[in-house]
Image (cartoon, rainbow, N blue to C red):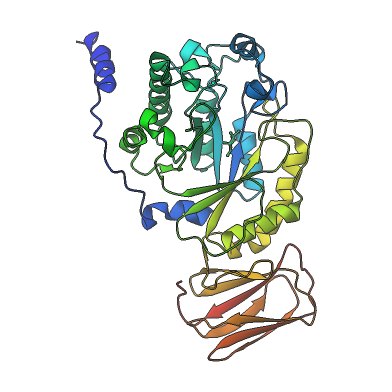
């Protein structure tokens, strides 16, 4: 019996019945912790840190699969301590983290029996399960656990020619299902699953490739392991939130679905790159504010070096971001975007309970800002960033007159304490 049991369990998990459903996104209540968190750390790390030319190195430098594999023999990080990553995230005021468990190059940072040719950190030189260590560090520090996973894998010919090489494409799909199963079952409940690379043969949309991945089926497996995992939209299924990628400015109206801006602190590449082109502290904060007033989250990336160390320049910049959030975080964390629609480059609002936070950009002494009507009476106004704000509220509008400003970058924040709970 004892001998038969593991076999029976293996069989069961292989043939686990999955009923493809029209998967529903998580509801408002289930998403609330993620939406309250507002700010997370993205971590791109893998064997591509060795050449230091970014996570697309294998593809952009046309490195043959066998040649690229040798990086797995060299990848032996000396100082990798995920606790340290989490400490840096905390010092930045980040409230969740997402680590690249496996990027497009196929190298898995964990003990992955499903990995084709065992291109994994446990089977190769590192001899370490980094996902295990990362998950332990997150839990120890009460940091929600996020994992990034690329469905596609540049090593597999069926990825490039799924119709001509159906067996290889099937192997790729089996690897994907096996690995998602491993990641979502072997490390306890995963809070965020962040897919990437759902497209095929380097083009098309994720939705175009859904015929291969069957994302409904894949994500039913994820939901089965943990019904509360927050899932991004890049597997070809709409997911629980929308993604906006890259460093372009956030503008326009408040978005109607939960969404996340993901971008890179070092704008050169996501994966480690000694060529540094870091966003300034004010740029990071302006992006975060512009995202929050439009009801979004921001996931800011760092790329640890081959030893697993987040470059000190990144850590220093993140600490500065954290210092601002320590002072003014009440206008970001736990808020929702609104009640007023933002006006690009002028102002935007967030709210929480009976408070409204007006984030003003480019404010100057003596300037008057006109806001539209709100459905609440302002009982008290405070200029959080220092100075004087005279506020007048009429039946139709609000005016704020600013003077003696002590701080105008990244913004000037006025808090209204109102007579009732604010809603949009
Ligand atoms: C893109 C890139 C990838 C990066 C990701 C982050 O999909 O392929 O390198 O990991 O964006 O959003």
Q: Nearer the viewer, residue 419 or 64?
A: 64
Q: How many numbered circles does the render carry?
A: 0
Q: Is residue 222 visible?
A: yes
Figure quadrant of the N terminus: top left
State ligand 1's quadrant.
Answer: top right
Position of residue 142 in the picture relative to residue 399 (left or right):
left
Q: Residue at x 53, y 56 (%)?
A: 296
Judge whether 111 appears above or below 220 on screen: above
Judge whether 283 appears above or below 350 on screen: above
Farthest-out residue, front: 164
When asked about the image quadrant of residue 173, the answer is: top left
Q: Position of residue 264 (x, y in %)?
A: 67, 42
Judge whether 418 appears above or below 17 on screen: below
Q: Residue at x 77, y 68 (%)?
A: 408
Farthest-out residue, left: 1
Q: Position of residue 240 (x, y in %)?
A: 41, 48
Q: Position of residue 13 (x, y in %)?
A: 28, 22
Position of residue 239 in the picture relative to residue 356 (left or right):
left
Judge whether 200 appears above or below 372 on screen: above
Q: Position of residue 202 (x, y in %)?
A: 54, 29
When asked about the image quadrant of residue 180, the answer is: top left
Farthest-out residue, bottom: 394
Q: Residue at x 63, y 60 (%)?
A: 289
């Amino acid at each position: 019996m004892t001998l038969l049991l593991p076999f029976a369990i293996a069989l069961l998990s292989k043939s686990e019945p999955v009923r493809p459903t029209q998967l529903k996104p998580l509801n408002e209540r289930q998403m609330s912790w993620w939406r309250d968190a507002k700010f997370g750390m993205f971590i791109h790390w893998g064997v591509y840190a060795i050449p230091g030319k970014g996570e697309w190195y294998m593809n952009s430098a046309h490195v043959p699969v066998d040649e690229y594999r040798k990086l797995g023999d060299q990848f032996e990080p000396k100082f990798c301590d995920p606790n340290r990553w989490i400490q840096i995230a905390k010092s930045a005021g980040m409230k969740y983290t997402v680590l690249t468990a496996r990027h497009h190059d196929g190298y898995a940072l964990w003990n992955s029996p499903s990995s084709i040719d065992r291109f994994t950190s446990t089977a190769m030189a590192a001899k370490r399960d980094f996902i295990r260590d990362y998950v332990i560090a997150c839990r120890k520090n009460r940091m929600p656990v996020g994992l990034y996973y690329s469905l596609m894998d540049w090593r597999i010919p069926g990825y490039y020619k799924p119709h001509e090489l159906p067996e290889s494409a099937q192997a790729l799909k089996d690897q994907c299902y096996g690995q998602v199963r491993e990641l979502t079952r072997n490390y306890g409940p995963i809070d965020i699953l962040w897919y990437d690379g759902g497209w095929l043969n380097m083009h098309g949309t994720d939705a175009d490739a859904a015929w291969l991945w069957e994302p409904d089926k894949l994500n039913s497996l994820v939901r089965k392991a943990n019904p509360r995992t927050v899932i991004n939209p890049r597997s070809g299924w709409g997911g629980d939130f929308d993604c906006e990628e890259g460093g372009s400015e956030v503008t326009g109206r408040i978005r109607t679905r939960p969404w996340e801006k993901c971008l890179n602190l070092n704008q050169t590449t996501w994966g480690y790159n000694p060529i540094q082109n870091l966003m300034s502290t004010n740029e990071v904060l302006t992006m975060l504010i512009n995202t929050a007033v439009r009801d979004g989250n921001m996931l800011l990336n760092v790329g640890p070096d081959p030893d697993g160390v987040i470059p000190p320049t990144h850590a220093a910049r993140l600490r500065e971001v954290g210092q601002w959030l320590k002072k003014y975080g009440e206008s970001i964390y736990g808020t929702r975007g609104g009640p007023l629609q933002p006006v690009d480059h002028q102002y935007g609002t967030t709210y929480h309970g009976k408070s409204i936070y007006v984030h003003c950009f480019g404010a100057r002494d003596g300037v008057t800002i006109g806001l539209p009507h709100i459905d609440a009476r302002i009982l008290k106004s405070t200029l959080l960033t220092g100075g004087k704000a005279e506020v007048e509220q009429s039946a139709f509008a609000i005016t704020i007159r600013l003077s003696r400003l002590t701080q105008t970058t990244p913004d000037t924040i006025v808090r209204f304490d109102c007579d009732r709970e604010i809603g949009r």
